[in-house]
Amino acid sequence: MAYSYSRVLGTGSYLPRIYVTNQMLAKRLAQNGIETSDEWIVARTGIHSRYFAAPDQTTSDLALIAAQRAIVAASIDFQAIELIIVATSTPDFIFPSTACLVQDKLGIRNGSAAFDVQAVCSGFAYALAVADGLIRGGTYRNALVIGAETFSRLLDFRDRTTCVLFGDGAGAVVLTESDRPGMLASALHADGSYAHILCAPGHVNGGVIQGSALLHMDGPAVFKLAVNVLEKVAREALTKANMSADQIDWLIPHQANIRIMYGTCRKLGLPVERMIVTLGEHGNTSAASIPLALDVAVRDGRVKSGDRVLIEGVGGGFTWGAVIICM
Ligand code: UT7
């Protein structure tokens, strides 16, 4: 029997071991002759600190702990997970997928499907929408959806316009089939003609990296596009869910820049108190930023059962998307 909805049964997250404040980063950059300051970073982005993975921590290690916490919060047996999707642009390997590595580390031996979704900072919205469709279609009953990144490994610490923005982390949710409303609507988009404005344009050929394996971003171009698409896609998801913005209890935007986040919140007519902000402490953790923020807000008691949450992401590709969830 196909159920009408998938719904969130539990959330979890994990931040890796190395805590880096703006001041610490500024000192590190100064050693390379690069000038930045806590004042600039806070004023232009809203970021105060971020976490970096320790040298022995991989994306699947971060994902594993977030997943374990989500499964415990969901109170289901690990072996009941039938589908694992990891949204990441910083996989452990070219292949196999990070999701397969997480399945193994979790000790799940039930033949669950496992694959990665690559939509950069919109990845978690994409992964949630895919899992929702597969559950509602009756293919799987329980899914683990993870956003996990080690963007610190892609950063060029000689480029102050990008290296001060990103951090590492992981967030996860367990989704289950349900006959009571859970995921209410989603809207996903991409425009590949903007691939060049945010990319890590390298590939491996004969064991050698061709092109650049470091992150490149035209910040102002991304900023302009983000502001433009985020309001539109939020309204599109609201229309699909037959809801107005004032029926949203919590806005959880991708945590990239506080000015973009406030702008979207204002355009939707939502009070800023209804927006979950973890950017200041976490930085931009790409596909992990939304599930990390969701888990923080669930655990501190702000997001409660029955609350309607609008999540929205925007990132490289160019990709963007929004999902409305009744918790
Ligand atoms: O996660 C995917 C989505 N990503 C985003 O949404 C990011 C979108 N873009 C942004 O958030 C912003 O564009 C940035 C935070 C990346 C940059 O902020 P901005 O206000 O657009 O600054 P800007 O690039 O226009 O640069 C302004 C000035 C420049 O100096 P001049 O040319 O005016 O002399 C930069 O060189 O700030 C300078 N600058 C810095 N100064 C100190 C750039 N980075 C730094 C820095 N420290 N780290």
Image: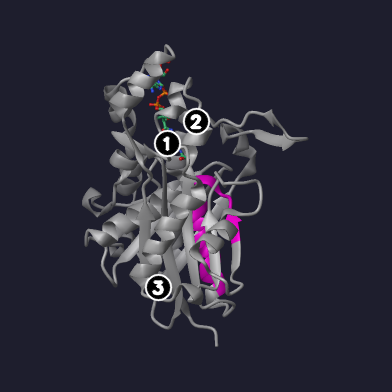
Question: Of 145 and 16, which appears nearest the observer?
Answer: 16
Range of magenta residues: 115-134
- Checking the image for residue 155, the label placed there is 2
Question: Of 52 and 304, which appears nearest the observer?
Answer: 52
Residue 274 lies in quadrant: bottom left
Is ligand 1 less than 8 Å from the beta carbon at label 1? yes
Q: Position of residue 240 (x, y in %)?
A: 46, 66
Q: Position of residue 275 (x, y in %)?
A: 28, 51
Location of ligand 1 given as a quarter of the image: top left
SS majority, magenta: helix
- State yes or no: discs 1 and 2 in contact (Cβ < 8 Å): yes
Left-right relation of 267 to 55 = left
- State yes or no: discs 3 and 2 in contact (Cβ < 8 Å): no
Mark 1–mark 2 distance (CA, rounded to whole Å): 8 Å
Category of crowding for the residue at label 3, using alpha-carbon neighbours closer than 10 angstroms: few (below 14), some (14–19), many (at least 20): many
- Against 220, is 100 above or below? below
Residue 34 lies in quadrant: top left
Q: Would you say residue 132 sits in the magenta stretch?
A: yes
